[in-house]
């Protein structure tokens, strides 16, 4: 990856995963390999024992019975540990936090003040412990009305970068919308904006025991077929519109 021009590796971190994969020890070892290869570490902290996304933000088992003030302290202490152990260049506080994180206490719609307090606690810890580390807030989607609503809510949080997920199968095939949303967000909130996640298939065939998320021609972006060249063309187009 380094030889091909990649400069940053994004790694997910789970609190106490049942398998140990994506836990602190495994992530620390991978982060060290990334740094030894001369690349930067972009850490996506899920604040969960498993996948966190717009549909599920499960509080770690270890924290489930904590009162809110204690949960906030736990977030600060855990964030400090992560910074000490891994020292990332970019840290994402939460993953796809469209409706907040650490549900139910940190739900953005049901408990907005608490959600913002948790994010601010993590941010303040990062600023004091690792002032050179860039802080990212990550939202899944590219619709202007939705991203405006969300990042307006985030105005009280101290952060540097806006990260967006863009998957055509879920977020639509209009790549010009991706560009206009990035431009608008960067201008409106004075942040750098990146595509944190995207994906595109090189085949519609079933090559393994898993189901395909994208399996129909109708799910593809026009002019980007599900071939190796089509996949590459899609990725290059995303790269160019972000630039």
Image (cartoon, helix red, strand yellow):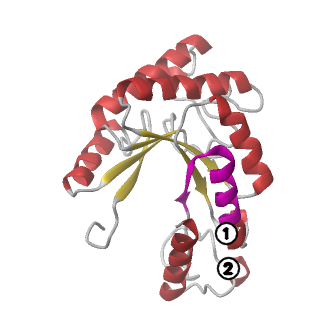
Q: Residue at x 65, y 44 (%)?
A: 189
Q: Is residue 183 magenta?
A: yes
Residue ID for mark 2: 221
Residue 168, label in figure = 1
> Is residue 130 found inside the magenta-colored segment of the image?
no
Residue 139 position within the rendered picture, expressed as x and y whole percent measured from the top left: 63, 48
Residue visible at 61% across and 84% down?
A: 224
Determine whether, in the image, residue 10 is placed left or right of residue 67. left
**Secondary structure that dominates the magenta span:** helix
- In percent of width and height, residue 197 lies at 54, 59
Where does the magenta region start and end? 178-197
Q: Residue at x 63, y 41 (%)?
A: 97
Q: Nearer the viewer, residue 135 or 218?
A: 135
Judge from the rendering whether residue 14 lies leftward or rightward of residue 29; answer left or right: right
Secondary structure beneath label 2? loop
Residue 67 higher or lower than 4, as above or below: above
Q: Give the crowd class for mark 1: few <14, some 14-19, many >=20 residues within 10 Å.
A: some
Tell me residue 138's x, y (percent): 58, 46
Q: Around disc 2, counting alpha carbons within 10 Å, would you say few (fewer than 14), some (14 to 19), or many (20 or more)?
A: some
Using the rendered image of the protein, determine whether residue 98 is visible from the camera's viewpoint. Answer: yes
Q: What residue occupies the far right of the structure in this picture?
A: 145
Instruction: State the image quarter where residue 164 is shown.
Output: bottom right
Residue contact at pointers 2 and 1, CB within 8 angstroms: yes
What kind of element bears circle 1?
helix
């Amino acid at each position: 990856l380094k030889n091909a021009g990649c400069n940053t590796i994004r790694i997910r971190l789970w609190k106490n995963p049942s398998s140990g994969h994506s836990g602190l020890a495994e992530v620390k070892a991978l982060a060290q390999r990334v740094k030894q290869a001369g690349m930067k570490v972009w850490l996506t902290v899920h604040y969960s024992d498993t996948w966190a996304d717009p549909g599920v933000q499960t509080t770690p088992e270890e924290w489930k019975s904590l009162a809110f003030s204690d949960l906030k302290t736990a977030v600060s202490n855990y964030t400090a540990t992560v910074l000490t152990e891994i020292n990332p260049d970019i840290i994402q506080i939460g993953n796809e936090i469209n409706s907040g994180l650490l549900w139910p206490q940190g739900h953005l719609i049901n408990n907005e003040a608490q959600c913002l307090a948790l994010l601010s606690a993590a941010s303040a810890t990062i600023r004091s412990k690792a002032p050179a580390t860039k802080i990212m807030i990550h939202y899944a989607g590219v619709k202007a009305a939705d991203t405006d609503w969300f990042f307006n809510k985030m105005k009280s949080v101290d952060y540097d970068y806006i990260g967006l997920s863009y998957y055509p199968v879920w977020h639509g095939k209009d790549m010009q919308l991706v560009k206009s949303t990035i431009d608008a967000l960067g201008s409106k909130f004075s942040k750098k904006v990146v595509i944190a996640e995207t994906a595109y298939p090189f085949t519609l065939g079933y090559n393994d025991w898993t189901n395909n998320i994208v399996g129909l021609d109708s799910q593809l972006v026009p002019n980007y077929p599900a071939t190796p060249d089509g996949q590459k063309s899609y990725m290059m187009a995303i790269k160019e519109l972000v630039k």
